[in-house]
Image (cartoon, coloured by chain):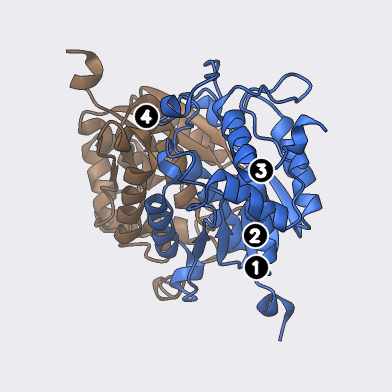
Chain colours: A brown, B blue
Amino acid sequence: MSAPAEQPRAVVLLSGGLDSSTCLALARKQGFVCHALTVLYGQRHQVEMDAARRVAQALGAHEHQEISVDLSAFGGSALTDDIAVPKGRSGDAMAQGIPVTYVPARNTVFLSLALAWAEALDASDIFIGVNALDYSGYPDCRPEFIMAFENTANLATKMAIEQGRRIKVHAPLIPMSKAQIIQTGLELGLDYGLTHSCYDPAPDGRPCGECDSCLLRAKGFAEAGVRDPLWGP
Amino acid sequence: MSAPAEQPRAVVLLSGGLDSSTCLALARKQGFVCHALTVLYGQRHQVEMDAARRVAQALGAHEHQEISVDLSAFGGSALTDDIAVPKGRSGDAMAQGIPVTYVPARNTVFLSLALAWAEALDASDIFIGVNALDYSGYPDCRPEFIMAFENTANLATKMAIEQGRRIKVHAPLIPMSKAQIIQTGLELGLDYGLTHSCYDPAPDGRPCGECDSCLLRAKGFAEAGVRDPLWGP
């Protein structure tokens, strides 16, 4: 038997954040040879790319590729434009509507690029670290979206149509709370000090501590009963 | 009433080829303010970008944007890699299997980028010039793929989920023969001398006349009973 048949390959979307890093750890745990893909989509800062590189190396990704597609050319998001990132919002405020940090069709773009690479690699598994429970504001983090994309992928590709391969989009974090995600990663040996979550970091890369992403991360660590290594000893 | 409500906006995928140019002409005919999108995905030649610019201008696109995403980094296609483009194939040979000019997940990537721009523009209509009849080799040119993507788009976006807008992916050329496409474009005043179809043009941009795309184009013009202006008087 050839090595690929024994060890299936997967494309894992990796931003370097808490969720996608845990997702990579889970894919590795499940025995996949992992091809990590970081999409540089015109974010306002580079610190998450550095985090993605550190995490890919630490978790033993077989390969890590970065691909650029400048979604900031389209506009429409606080993550790519000069729109202020909200700070200090309560959980209730976060639960109301889709936030300005939403990037139009981002996960559709991410998954389509992951699918393109997966097919070129002859890999039928894609992992994405979306999470619907603690962050229900984004429409493209919901299970019905993931299922619809998987269905599209199985109609879109040579691999599926000509070779009869079934493409699977894994979203193992979907039903987990942030605390459960953190506990899962810690059990798999993930060092969360390597990851990056902040939407609006200082020029030296330190997290702001006040954006939705920082607040959800802090809540998750508090509920997990562990200290976030990002915030020093 | 505001102007956008009277004149709806659409994102139209435009490669500068015969099909996508006809699709833009149809979208204009239907009264859409057209935002033409050309995806530079690592094709081996630049001549089709020049064609896209000429066509967008000639057909009165409101705006024309080019976005780069280097799918050649993933490999797996004669259109992005150093794989020979097949020449002189018969219709029977073309009908057998998916050709090496297939680019993994290309139309999924194209539509996801069109969706991102459409949402940023607050436009709920997307046009793509896929054609299933004369070119059934590509899985992502079939109606079931288009419908699956449209379903995904309506689960993926803030526009659909929060505002209740229904996103529509128009693929008006799907049921047409190449000859019907050409007749349609001619009736709408499209100058096919501005378009470009060849997979493997000469350095000066002249079509090879022998690749699948050139042969299908020639067959279409022959069946339509008109001369292709690309080939001189």
How far apart are the two marked residues, 4 and 3, measured between alpha carbons?
A: 29 Å
Mark carried by residue B97: 4
Q: Quadrant of residue A46?
A: top right
Q: Which residue is mark 1?
A: B30
Q: CA distance from mark 4 to mark 1?
A: 35 Å
Kind of residue at badge 3: Gly
Question: For the point 70% across and 42% down, which residue is it?
Answer: B226
Q: Chain of mark 1?
A: B
The secondary structure type at the circle numbered 2 is helix
Q: Please, which residue is most extreme toward the top here?
A: A1
Chain identifier of the residue bearing label 2 in the image: B
Gap between marks 1 and 2, in whole Å? 6 Å
Residue lying farthest right? B233
Label 1 secondary element = loop
- Amino acid bearing label 1: Gln
Q: Nearer the viewer, mark 3 or mark 1?
A: 3
Q: Earlier in the sequence, mark 4 or mark 2?
A: 2
Q: Position of residue B225 (x, y in %)?
A: 66, 43
* Residue A148 x, y percent position in the rendering: 33, 55
Question: What amino acid type is highlighted by mark number 4?
Answer: Gly
Residue B26 is labelled as: 2
Residue, disc 3 = B225
Q: Is residue B71 above or below residue A213?
A: above
Q: Secondary structure at mark 4?
A: loop
Q: Residues at badges 1 and 2 in contact (C-beta under 8 Å)? A: yes
Mark earlier in primary sequence (4, 1): 1
Same-subunit check for callouts 4 and 3:
yes
What is the CA distance from the residue labelled 3 to the residue labelled 1?
Answer: 26 Å
Residue that protrudes farthest toward the bottom in the picture: B1
| Mark toward the viewer: 4 or 3 | 3
